[in-house]
Amino acid sequence: MTEGAFSVDGVFFLAVICMTAVTYSLRAGGYWVMGRLPITEKMRRGLEALPGAIIVSTILPIVMQGGLAVGLCLIVAAAAQFLLKKEYIAVFCAAGAAAALRAAGV
């Protein structure tokens, strides 16, 4: 018990520093490259569509694995967000739908 509360293994510390450096260089490099490229109309449309594509590619495997209840909860959340324009309320609606569906045995 002679180690301090904030002692850290040297290899772990080096790994964290390297991962931080790589992450920062990729982010900064992306901004640097995009600052030097002309943004065409086609590229602009692609960049605007990127967030939606990332959301779909993240959520779709979860829905496919989760089954009907997860799909219905996603529909409830999307409808609540569309109608109410409040993210937290949409989350609570989806959680309520999940609880109701699980209670119903779906």
Image (cartoon, grey):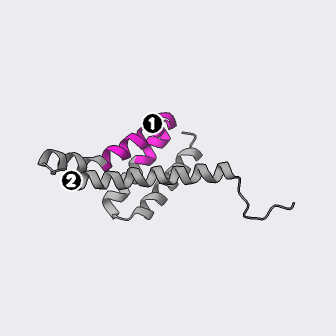
Amino acid at pointer 2: Arg
In this rendering, would 100 be left or right of 33? Answer: right
Image point 36% across, 58% down: which residue? 81
Label 2 element class = helix
The residue most toward the left is: 41
Q: Is residue 87 left or right of residue 12?
A: left
Mark 1, secondary structure of its residue: helix
Give the amino acid at mark 1.
Answer: Pro
Residue 61 image label: 1
**60 w.r.t. 47: above or below:** above
Establish if 45 lies above or below 86: above
Q: Where residue 103 appears, x then y in whole percent?
A: 59, 47
Sequence-wise, which precedes: disc 2 or disc 1? 2
In percent of the image, x 52 and y 50: which residue is there?
19
Which quarter of the figure is the C terminus placed in? top right
Distance from disc 2 to disc 1, alpha carbons, whole Å, reads 36 Å
Residue at 39% across, 47% down: 75
Rendered location of residue 10, percent (x, y): 68, 52
**Residue 30, above or below 67:** below
Please tell me which residue is depicted at 36% across the width and 52% down the height of the picture: 78
User: Percent from the top left, x then y, of residue 82?
Assistant: 31, 57
Callout in the foreground (2, 1): 2
Tell me, yes or no, whether the highlighted magenta stretch contains residue 56.
yes
Residue marked by disc 2: 36
Q: Depth check: give the residue in front, 102 or 15.
A: 15
Q: Is 55 colored magenta in this rendering?
A: yes
Mark 2, Cα crowd under 10 Å, few <14 / some 14-19 / many 20+, is few
Q: Which residues are magenta?
A: 51-74
